[in-house]
Image: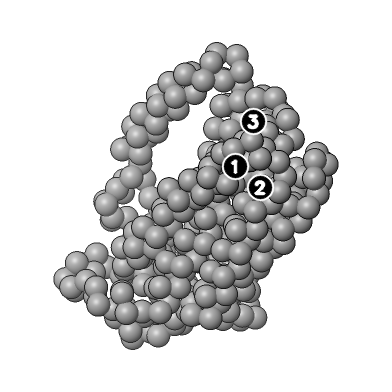
């Protein structure tokens, strides 16, 4: 379910890149800001109608879904009564693994998101409208892979083929290893349009495998504090959004920046950060509940998943 919801961000990226190219080509660059500004207002109205503080307060949720959420994260009163374990957060290696993974993943994500159009325009010489289509294609592939990866990860856990810890580590490592290989290869293929677009699409698309890695791992470690952990790790994850484009700008700001060697360096830096952070996550990540997160006496996410299945079956029998 998490991978399915995260795929929405990729679908939004696809839509925005496609529409931005068309709008800029036919109505001018200003129309892009007007359109998406108005869209954001409409989205907020939609959010107000469907978002609620608790599943118990939601008027349209099914009973099965309500029970599943409550059993997964515990009763709201239990969470609110306990003080936040800030010391536990910042002294936990699995939490730091999340922060490092978020940083590394987003370095590649933001670097490519903000610079794919420039690369396609300066190196491959695509028009604005064509640029929009080929910039969006990798994110469409990523959305599909995210959903497939989520189902695959759940299947491996449910069948007890791999533990939760192994699933998170494997999917994160593979989801950053394969894009790294594609980025390195991209630095050497020159202006071969079809190969360049294919490698670029794979570099971004295969990154979707990490949806079953660090992106859902916050819930494994601490279901009742997953939102706070996401906020902490995402603080580190936003740094590449500021630093990455600046680094690319510095590397490609002079006339030489429109040549393949400079872009090769951009791709190599992203690939290196991908791999270093993936290795760190692979060593220190965990699928077990943290020591400060054991409200039901369970110690691992696998045990918790088994308990939830048993409770849902019992609830079905009652009805």
First of labels 3, 1 by sequence position: 3
Q: Nearer the viewer, mark 3 or mark 2?
A: 2
Q: Rounded to the nearest whole Å, what is the CA distance between mark 3 and mark 2?
A: 23 Å
Residue 225 on image: x %, y %: 31, 67
Which residue does the numbered mark 3 point to in the structure image? 132
User: Which residue: 27% across, 52% down?
Assistant: 53
User: Which residue: 74% across, 35% down?
Assistant: 124
Dot 3: few (<14), some (14–19), or many (≥20) neighbours within 10 Å? many
Q: Which of 283 and 192 is in front in this view?
A: 192
Q: Rounded to the nearest whole Å, what is the CA distance between mark 1 and mark 2?
A: 6 Å
First of labels 3, 2 by sequence position: 3
For residue 262, which numbered disc appears in the image? 2
Dot 1: few (<14), some (14–19), or many (≥20) neighbours within 10 Å? some
For residue 116, which numbered disc appears in the image? none
Question: Disc 1 on helix, strand or loop?
Answer: loop
Q: Rounded to the nearest whole Å, what is the CA distance between mark 3 and mark 1?
A: 21 Å
Which residue does the numbered mark 1 point to in the structure image? 252
Mark 1 vs 2: CB contact within 8 A: yes
In the displayed structure, 270 sits above or below 155; it is above
Residue 181 on image: x %, y %: 72, 61
> Within the image, what quadrant is residue 56 found in?
bottom left
User: Which residue: 61% across, 64% down?
Assistant: 272
Q: According to the image, what is the colour scheme of the structure? A: one colour
Residue 245 on image: x %, y %: 50, 45
């Amino acid at each position: 379910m998490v991978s399915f919801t995260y795929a929405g961000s990729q679908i939004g990226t696809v839509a925005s890149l496609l529409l931005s190219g068309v709008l800029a080509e036919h109505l001018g660059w200003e129309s892009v800001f007007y359109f998406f500004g108005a869209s954001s207002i409409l989205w907020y109205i939609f959010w107000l109608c469907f978002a609620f503080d608790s599943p118990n307060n939601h008027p349209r949720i099914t009973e099965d879904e309500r029970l599943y959420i409550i059993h997964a994260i515990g009763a709201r009163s239990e969470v609110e009564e306990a003080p936040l374990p800030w010391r536990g957060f910042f002294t936990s290696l699995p939490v730091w693994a999340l922060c490092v993974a978020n940083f590394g993943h987003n370095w590649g994500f933001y670097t490519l998101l903000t610079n794919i159009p420039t690369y396609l325009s300066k190196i491959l010489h695509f028009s604005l409208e064509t640029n929009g289509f080929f910039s969006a294609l990798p994110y469409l592939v990523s959305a599909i892979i995210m959903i497939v990866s989520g189902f695959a990860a759940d299947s491996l856990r449910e069948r007890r083929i791999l533990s939760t810890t192994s699933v998170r580590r494997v999917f994160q490592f593979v989801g950053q290893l394969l894009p790294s290989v594609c980025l390195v290869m991209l630095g050497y293929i020159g202006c071969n349009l079809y190969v360049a677009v294919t490698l670029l699409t794979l570099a971004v698309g295969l990154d979707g495998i990490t949806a079953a890695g660090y992106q859902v791992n916050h819930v494994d470690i601490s279901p009742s504090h997953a939102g706070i952990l996401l906020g902490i790790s995402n603080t580190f994850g936003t740094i590449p959004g500021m630093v990455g484009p600046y680094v690319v700008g510095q590397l490609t700001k002079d006339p030489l920046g429109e040549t393949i060697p400079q872009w090769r360096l951009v791709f190599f830096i992203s690939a290196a950060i991908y791999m270093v952070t993936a290795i760190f996550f692979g060593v220190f990540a965990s699928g077990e509940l943290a020591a400060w997160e054991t409200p039901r006496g369970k110690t691992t996410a696998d045990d918790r998943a088994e308990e939830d299945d048993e409770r849902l079956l019992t609830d079905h029998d009652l009805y």
